[in-house]
Image (tube, grey):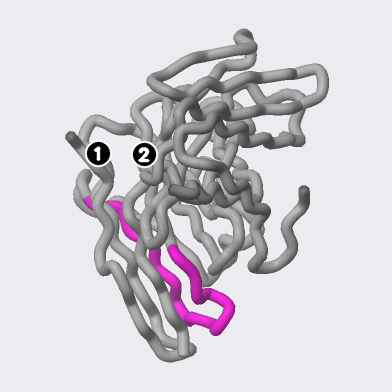
């Protein structure tokens, strides 16, 4: 069964460093998302991406964040200068059509120290 | 009830009993709703969805009920099994087209007693 895959599963980084979280969405999907989940809290929307551009972003997704789909297969989230409060699980999701279910990856646990 | 900080509401049920998990959503314009299950250390896993033109949808052992009048969504799990133990989130699809996104509820922990 096709699935969304994310790497790495766990990333530890020092405050101020740049991190890139990687995702491979399901191959025939057209809509891509990043969400995050701070420990014990609900899943929060960060950004959506369609047709090679950002279609929607939340207040969390400030200038420190960027997304790319560099090669038609990978979908990356970059945090330029990490802060302690960026520590969370980051989930990539994709869906085939507008009103279809979104499939989530297993997540990357980002720990900023 | 509402959860604060790290403490999610917990529903404890006996194995074999039916479970009902409730959710209140906020946006009356939302047209699509999904229930997700999240096991420890994993991503949300799709369980069942329902569109706003329906009030009930059944899957295998699960039923979702939608009451648009009071903006309430519920998930019923029949004959609950230990493998059903997880955190359950309802999500509403907000926005249209490429601008749509999922807004998640706070989550409820389902604990199944053997």
**Would residue B29 be found to the left or right of residue A73 on screen?**
right
Q: Which percent across, then down, holds residue B31?
A: 63, 21
Is the residue at mark 1 from the same chain as the one at mark 2?
yes
Residue labelled with disc 1? A26
- Displayed quadrant of residue A1: top left
Picture residue at 67% right of the left edge, 53% below the top: B9
Q: Nearer the viewer, mark 1 or mark 2?
A: 2
Where's residue B47, x and y in %? 43, 32
Q: Position of residue A24 (x, y in %)?
A: 24, 50
- The front one of A26 and B78 is B78
**Is residue B76 or residue B6 the one in the foreground?**
B76
Residue A30 vertical placement versus A100 (above, below): below
Question: Extreme top residue here?
Answer: B53
Q: Residues within 10 Å of mark 1 (few under 14, many from 20)?
A: many
Q: Which residue sits at x=64%, y=45%? A: B105
Residue at figure coordinates x 81%, y 17% from the top left: B69
Q: Which of the labelled discs sits on residue B22, or is there none?
A: none
Q: In the depicted view, which residue is nearer to us: B77 or A43?
A: B77
User: Quadrant of the rendered structure where residue A85 is?
Assistant: bottom right
Chain containing the residue with disc 1: A
Can residue B111 be seen by looking at this rendering? yes
Q: CA distance from mark 1 to mark 2?
A: 8 Å
From the viewer's perspective, is B111 left or right of A60?
left
What is the secondary structure assignment of the residue under circle 2? strand
What percent of the width, then of the height, locates residue B10? 63, 52
The stretch of residues the image draws in magenta is A74-89
Q: Taking A30 as reference, is A39 left or right?
A: right
Q: Which residue is mark 2?
A: A103
- Asked if the residue at tag 2 contacts the one at tag 1, i.e. Cβ–Cβ closer than 8 Å, the answer is yes
Examine the rendered structure and indicate whether residue B35 appears above or below residue B2. above
**Quadrant of the image occupied by residue A12:** bottom left
Between discs 1 and 2, the one toward the N terminus: 1
């Amino acid at each position: 069964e096709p699935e969304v895959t994310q790497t790495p599963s766990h990333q530890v980084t020092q405050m101020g460093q740049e991190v890139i979280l990687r995702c491979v969405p399901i191959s025939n999907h057209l809509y891509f998302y990043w969400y995050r989940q701070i420990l014990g809290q609900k899943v929060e929307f960060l950004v959506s991406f369609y047709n090679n551009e950002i279609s929607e972003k939340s207040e969390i997704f400030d200038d420190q964040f960027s997304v790319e789909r560099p090669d038609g297969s990978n979908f990356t989230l970059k945090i330029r200068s990490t802060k302690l409060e960026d520590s969370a699980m980051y989930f990539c999701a994709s869906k085939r059509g507008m009103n279809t279910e979104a499939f989530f990856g297993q997540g990357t646990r980002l720990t900023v120290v | 009830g509402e959860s604060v900080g790290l403490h999610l509401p917990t529903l404890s049920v006996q194995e074999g009993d039916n479970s009902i998990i409730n959710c209140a959503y906020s946006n009356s314009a939302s047209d699509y709703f999904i229930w997700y299950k999240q096991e420890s250390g994993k991503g949300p896993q799709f369980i069942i969805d329902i569109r706003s033109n329906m009030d009930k949808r059944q899957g295998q052992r699960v039923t979702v009920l939608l009451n648009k009048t009071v903006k309430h969504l519920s998930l019923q799990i029949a004959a609950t099994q230990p493998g059903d133990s997880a955190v359950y989130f309802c999500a509403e699809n907000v926005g249209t087209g490429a601008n749509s996104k999922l807004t998640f509820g706070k989550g409820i922990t389902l604990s199944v007693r053997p």
